[in-house]
Image (tube, rainbow, N blue to C red):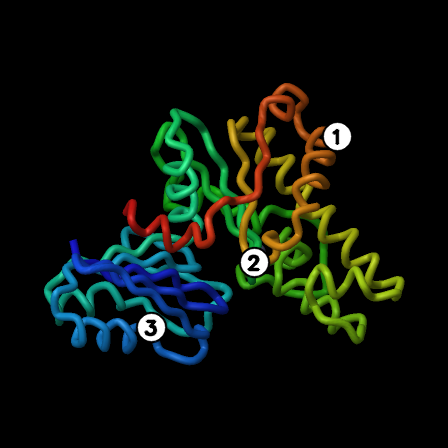
Amino acid sequence: MNRLLIDYGASRCRYLIEKEEGEFSGEFATADKDLEHFIRTQLKCFEAIEAVHIAYAGQIVGGKILSAPNIMTNHTGLKSSIEEIFRIPVKIENDLKCAALAEYHTRGESISLFCAYIGTGFGGALVEEGRLMRGNSNMAGEVGHLPYKKSPFLCGCGKDDCVELYCSGKALAKWVEYYGLECVPTLAGIEASPNEEASLILQNFYGALSHAVATIVTLFNPTYLILGGSVVTGNPKIEHIVRKNVNNMAFPLAANDVTIEITRLSNGCLEGTKWL
Ligand SMILES: [Zn+2]
C-alpha cells in the first residue's frame, strides 16, 4: 500500500513515503512548515498515496487532536479536512502510543511493555498482549504529567509540579536559563558545567525520571520498560542509573521482574505509524 507516514514531534517532523517502487524519507523543523500544507503538497505530488498515518505529540481522542502542550499550532480539523479533500483515510495517534506499538512488534512476544521517551517532553504508553492501554479517553500512560514537586514553571498541561518540568529536553533548557548558566542545555552540556546549580539540575532530572519509572514499574508490572527519545539516546548511562534507582524505589517483586532497555529503533514513533 502507498502510504504517507509522519512523526510530528514538538521540534522535528520526520516522514516516510512508502511506495511500491521503494521508500523515501525526510525531515524538517516543526516550526518551519505547516503540517496540513505539507500533507496537501505531498498528496498532490504523489497521487498514488492511499492513506496518511500520523504520530502526533499531543493528546488524541478518536482521531481528533485534543491538546498538544508542546506544539503551538492548532491542527484540530486536520483529519477531516484532508479526508474531505483527498478522499483517503487519515489516522492520527499519540506519538508515544505509536512508539509503544513499534517497540512491541520488534520483540514479537506476548508481553507487557511500557515505552517512555524523553525528547522535548516526556511521554509514555503501555502495550499489553499487543493491545494499547488507552484508559477512558486515550490519556493512559501520560507519565510526564505525574506529580513530582513544585517548580517555578508551568507545564503545558497547566500544573506546576509535573515530572516533565524536571525531566525533559524543554525542562533542561528552562532550568539552565533560570539559573543563568552558560552551558549547552543538554545532559552532556550541563554535566560539563562546574556550577553548583548544574549538579542540582542533574539531580532533579534523575530524581524525577527515577520517580516516574519506579511508579510505572510498581503500577503496571511490565515485562519490558523501554527508554528512548533524543535526551536518552546518546546517554547510555541513563539505563544504569534508572536500573539502580528502580531497584531501590519500586515495589520489589515488580522491580526484580522488569527488563529495562534503551530503544533499538532509530525512530519508534514513525515506525509505529505502520501499525495503526
Ligand atoms: Zn503537566
Q: Nearer the viewer, residue 21 or 32?
A: 21
- Label 2: few (<14), some or many (≥20) within 10 Å? some
Question: Can you tell me which quadrant of the image ligand 1 is in?
Answer: bottom right
Callout 1 touching callout 3 (CB < 8 Å): no
The amino acid on which the numbered mark 3 sits, given as a three-letter code, is Leu
Q: CB of residue at label 1: within 8 Å of ligand 1? A: no
Residue 271 appears in the figure:
yes
Task: Give left or right: position of 246 versus 85.
Answer: right
Which label's residue is closer to the chain start, 1 or 2? 2
Left or right placement of residue 248 versus residue 125 in this view: right
Quickly name the residue at label 1: 248
Give me the C-alpha separation between circle 1 and circle 2: 26 Å
Q: Position of residue 53 (x, y in %)?
A: 27, 57
Residue position for label 3 = 35
- Disc 2 marks a residue whose amino acid type is Ser
Q: Residue at x 35, y 32 (%)?
A: 130
Residue at numbered disc 2: 230
Q: How many marks?
A: 3
Look at label 1 and name its amino acid: Asn
**Side of 187 where 77 appears, left or right:** left
Going from the N terminus, do you reach mark 1 or mark 3 first?
A: 3
Q: CA distance from mark 1 to mark 3?
A: 44 Å
Kindly indicate the quadrant of the structure image that contains residue 219: top right
Marked residue nearer the N-terminal end (3 or 2): 3
Image height check: is 153 above or below 200? below
230 shown above or below 255: below
